[in-house]
Amino acid sequence: MYTKPVLSLEDAKKMAAAAEAEALANQWPVVIAIVDDGGHLLYLQRMDGVAPVSAQIAPAKAVAAALGKRESRIYEEMINNGRYSFLSAPGLEGMLEGGVPVFADGVCVGAIGVSGVKSSQDAHIAKAGIVALGLDPN
């Protein structure tokens, strides 16, 4: 039987707090979504002033990153480089920059997705959340 690390609710709250602090420091209203390795929502936070659609985009970015075990921007880049058929990938809707997988001991334990500002800023906020767990976001 294999054993693996998993994200706890405590981990999700710690990530969200760090991501929120980074967003607030830059005055970026965002939605922060954290999912487990199966893409199931563990935590969602919608900051004041963010567009309502971001509450759907952030979890979708997180799901894409968790299930693919790679940053969601990779999918965006593939599509932008002409691989349009990837738009039909089942279960993946958040193929935009801003979803970052979380790896612990070489295992993808989930992901954090952020939406509300420029995609590169969303990813920056997400990575701040991962760093709060003492993990490498790259």
Image (cartoon, rainbow, N blue to C red):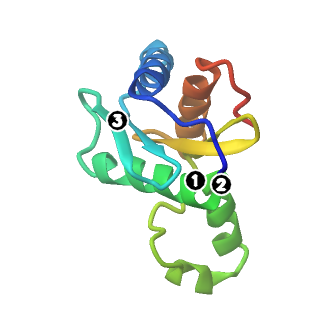
Q: Does residue 17 show up?
A: yes
Up-down relation of residue 8 to residue 82 (above or below): above
Kindly identify which residue carries mark 1. 65
Q: Is residue 96 visible?
A: no
Q: How many numbered badges does the structure rendering display?
A: 3
Q: Mark 2 points at which residue?
A: 69
Task: Residue at 53%, 79% (x, y): give it.
Answer: 89
Disc ID at residue 29: none
Q: Name the residue under label 3.
A: 43
Q: Which residue lies furthest to the bottom in this view?
A: 85
The structure residue drawn at horizontal position 46% and vertical position 18%, both measured from the top left corner, is: 14
**In the rendered view, does 102 fall on the left or right side of 41?**
right
Indicate the amino acid at tag 2.
Lys
Residue 77, given in percent of the width and then of the height, sits at: 69, 64
10 Å neighbourhood of mark 1: few (<14), some, or many (≥20)?
many
Label 1 close to label 2 by CB (< 8 Å): yes
The amino acid beneath tag 3 is Tyr
Mark 3, Cα crowd under 10 Å, few <14 / some 14-19 / many 20+, is: some
Gap between marks 1 and 2, in whole Å? Answer: 5 Å
Q: In the rendered image, which quarter contains the C terminus? A: top right
Secondary structure of the residue carrying numbered label 1: helix
